[in-house]
Amino acid sequence: MDYLESLNEPQRAAVVNTEGPTMIIAGAGSGKTRVLTYRIAYLIQSKGVDPFNILALTFTNKAAKEMRNRIEKVVGTEARNLWMGTFHSVFARILRAEASKIGFQSNFTIYDTDDSKSLIKHILKESGLDEKVYKPGMVLSRISGAKNRLVSWRDYMENPAIQAEDEAAAKPHMGKIYKAYVERCFKSDAMDFDDLLFNTNVLFREHPAVLNKYQHRFHYVLVDEFQDTNFSQYLITKKLASVRRNICIVGDDAQSIYAFRGADIQNILNFEKDFDDAQIFKLEQNYRSTKNIINVANSVISKNKAQLKKNIWTANTDGHLVEVIKAASDQEEGRLVSYAIFEQKNNNHLRYSDFVILYRTNSQSRAMEEALRKQNIKYKIIGGLSFYQRKEIKDLIAYMRYTINYNDEQAFRRIVNLPKRGIGDTSQDKLVVTAYERGISIWDVLNDAHSFFSGRTANALTSFADMIKGFRLEADRKDAFEAASHIARGSGLLRELYEDKTIEGLNRYENVQELLNAMQEFVHNPETEDKSLGAFLQEVALLTSNDDNKDEDQDYVTLMTIHMAKGLEFPYVYAVGMEEDLFPSQMMLGSRQDLEEERRLFYVAITRAMHKLTLSYALTRYRFGRLKNCEPSRFLEEIDPAYMMINKKVGSRSPVGDTEHARILLKSIKRDRNTTSARKQTHQPDADFAPSDTSQLQEGMKVEHPKFGFGTVKGIETEGANRKAKVDFEQAGEKTLLLSFAKLKIHE
DNA sequence: TTTCTGTACTAATCA
DNA sequence: AGTACAGAAA
């Protein structure tokens, strides 16, 4: 095996010790993906394991695809037979095969976040609850959290601690909503993302024969990015591996950045307990980055209290110092960054594909895009508002979904009056209520419209139902592409878009054509076994980005969120928007754990870089259409100044190793930080800090601000949308706060 | 029931 | 800066 030669000692050990429970703790850039791919290749080639018997789980589609390609390079086309994919896609596949055992149709729909939120809104409306109190997004994340801990709605309602929590938060009906949500999903033959894991657990728990089947199918189970698993995922892998015990987990606690999705580092400890004979390998040598970058990364992550002992080191050269760019505005930041990229590329004979721009939130991409376009630099955004989240695409897909699954309520709601066909909200609500009262499905009511509705509406409903039936006939007889084309035309969607001659309208029309093209490719792909519309929908539900490799060899700068960048590496990394409240995000300042997660995210950003890391911040930035003053991120101060370099005017380069500059820069960063607010006395609010309704706020009231601490209201100015309060804070001094933004808790 | 218009709210990260 | 929603007008 010549590839074994290319590995260092711990890496090789982690590859060849294939039997029994194994834990690989792999620092950033330590060749984790190599080890994982070689381990799988080794299983196939040297141990003669059939790829059908190997299950490898990843977190993103991107990671799965890349790993499959790399394995294919070593073992050839056999790699296609591996069970490899995201947790969600692998278990969706298994659930489809076993759906009837838990009461679902095998063509069940997968609800995305939008579907879930809209269903919650309907439930709130029907049960007369206030959307302001039960914010749909918040309700959903509460339900999601419960599901990820495998707490069913019944458990939820019977658990006194949870009930007390909801009472305390003044949201006593949460359990009821959870129950209604689950029931409606079930009625719609739909599962949301969390259900794919939750229901897999149900399936395995209630059908031991099924579990047994898969336990014997998967001789080897491998889990990548184990630090990002939640309890639900952990339990699935544990059960699957409990017979043959060949489970291999790979992870790095320093890169755990999905706690918001229920990921729990605790799972690493659980693993050690559940498999106490596990062999443990530590990969600590970094092959990716320069010494300076590793030093920066280590100095940052050392500020975290919660972490496993690890010593990341590298034999690489010192390399460039980390550069910090200070900009006056977000626009200037874009300009400076794109110019720096331009210059660096030309001076060093690089390609644009050597560069990546990383940011905390997708909304930051816009300023960067503009600047790159002006500089004539090609770029590509990964993620963001993905193709499949666009309205016109979702509309057409909803038609397809409803054609395949008559019970899909969210798809029905979306398309029943689109384009307008005289079935408004009133009729829709009546339809749902009628179905409920009679205990029949919406589809049944639709097909018997004349018994429940009068004249015009009944006709509209009947012809809608007939149209869908026609689509179904088409879908049964033809392949996915032909069926979809028929639906796009027959529904009137295509015509409506065609008639919209605005630029956006043209774009939308093209997008729909692109979807149809993608479907044609799907149909013509020789690897596609099932070419039906239903099969296509199953594929598409779990796709987020349409990273088609059409322009694979093109030369462009990559733009993406730090989250998306995990597992990737680039020679030159620009992490932009290093500002307080943006990174770390203002929503993560509530607790120490949250802040540590942000810091790990920063760590991930730093460790993507191979040769050079550049950080940037702006002093002002447009947010919500308003110009906002910003201060540099606290993370900048956490970097050891010995590894930093000031950015003098673009065009002249500072000599490497000039730490004097760093000292000056650090001072300037500190100055920027201190002018904007009195940061010294960072106020730590209680864990249960919740902003009060400030509409009745009056002069003289005592308030608490999450950052400024306690204060007294001195006056109210500018009533209405821009209502402001002047508050005298004990520590931070007098501030004028825009009440629509400020989170204030009133202390009487 | 639909369309128009002003207003309120928003954008945290992924599957 | 956009957009989603609510209420008014047609």
Image (cartoon, coloured by chain):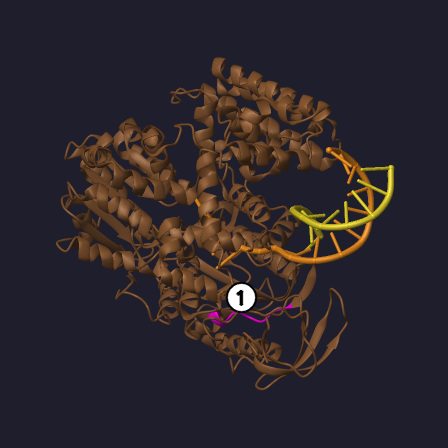
Chain colours: A brown, B orange, C yellow
Segment colored magenta = A629-635
Marker count (numbered): 1
Q: Which quadrant of the figure contains the N terminus of chain A?
A: top left
Judge by depth and name the residue closer to the eye, A650 or A40.
A40
Relative placement, left or right, of A150 versus A523 is left
User: Which residue: 47% across, 74% down?
Assistant: A637
In the structure shown, which secondary structural element does the residue marked by tag 1 occupy? helix
The residue that label 1 is drawn on is: A586
Residue A494 image point, x, y percent: 66, 25
User: Which residue: 42% across, 28% down?
Assistant: A107
Rendered view: A618 above or below A116: below
Residue A309 seen: yes
Residue A434 image point, x, y percent: 58, 33
Q: Quadrant of residue A400?
A: top right
- The residue lying furthest to the top in this view is A477
Q: Quadrant of residue A214?
A: top left
Judge by depth and name the residue closer to the eye, A182 or A592.
A182
Residue A262 seen: no
Rendered view: A172 above or below A686: above
Residue A664 image point, x, y percent: 53, 78
Judge by depth and name the residue closer to the eye, A326 or B13.
B13
- Three-letter amino acid code of the residue under disc 1: Gln
Chain of the residue under the numbered disc 1 shown in the image: A
User: Which residue: 40% across, 22% down?
Assistant: A528
Residue A613 image point, x, y percent: 46, 60
Q: Which quadrant of the figure contains the C terminus of chain A?
A: bottom right
